[in-house]
Amino acid sequence: KAWSIIGPYGSGKSTFALFMAKLLSGQPNPWVDRCLVQLRLVDPVLENRVRTEIVDSSVKYLPIVVNGSRSPIDLALCRALSRSISEPLLETSWAPDQFKVDVAVTLETLEAGISNSSKVLELYDQAANLAKIAHYKGLFVIMDEFGKFLERAAWQGDLPDLITAQYLAELASGPSENQILFTVILHQGFQHYASSLSQRQWIEWAKIQGRFRQFDFNE
């Protein structure tokens, strides 16, 4: 349940991810409806499968979108989680007050420069459980422009940020009852960001890449 979507600039990766987030959220959306009409014209078999397995089955996931940046990954993940429980246009009733306090305190700590990957992962595991209580199947976590995080890690010559992504991928792929779908979006494969790494660092980076099932995206 951890995937990397790789495709060139302008191929529509981010739009596709937004479509999946809206589709899996289970919320009525005119844009999604229009997309499905277009899909029926292009591939009626796939459109029927999407309607049967997702729309008509009422399967829904709580979307959390992480914007790519050159900040630490644990900070970016916590900021995205904070937005998902605070923005007025989003459905936030699934998150109790104590959870919101925990996220706010963790975010404050991370913004002060104190890394705490384990706490961020714990919050995501808790969020998945709370989402299930609120009748979602789990979380759908999208990290757009993931290459920016890779560029930062390569520039630093170390792997603490990528380890956070690896652990979240392992959490998504593990036996936990709290379901997490984790998708990262890149313009090129992991290896293209690793030219400046030593052989030892490259081996560790390859282990992280191996936690994701790769899909090549064509418009």
Image: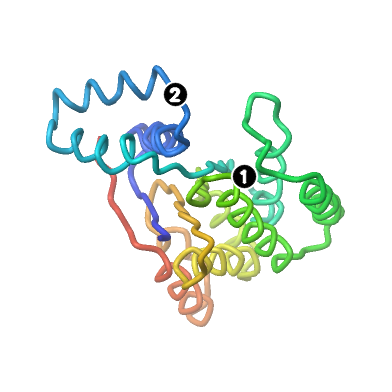
- Identify whether 162 is placed above or below 188: below
Residue shown at 40% from the left, 46% from the top: 187
Report the side of 216 relative to 59 (left or right): left
Tell me, for residue 106, which label it has, or none.
none
Q: In this view, which residue lies farthest toward the bottom?
A: 200
Mark before the other along the chain sequence, 2 or 1: 2
Report the side of 83 relative to 61 (left or right): right
State the image coordinates of residue 72 (x, y, percent, origin top left). 68, 55
Q: Amino acid at mark 2?
A: Pro
How far is mark 2 from mark 1, CA to CA?
30 Å
- Identify whether 105 is placed above or below 212: above
Which residue position holds label 2?
28
Mark 2 or mark 1, whichever is nearer to me = 2
Residue shown at 56% from the left, 69% from the top: 167
Q: Amino acid at mark 1?
A: Ser
Q: How many marks?
A: 2
Which residue position holds label 1?
69
Residue shown at 71% from the left, 52% from the top: 75
State the image coordinates of residue 196 (x, y, percent, origin top left). 52, 66
Q: Secondary structure at mark 2?
A: loop
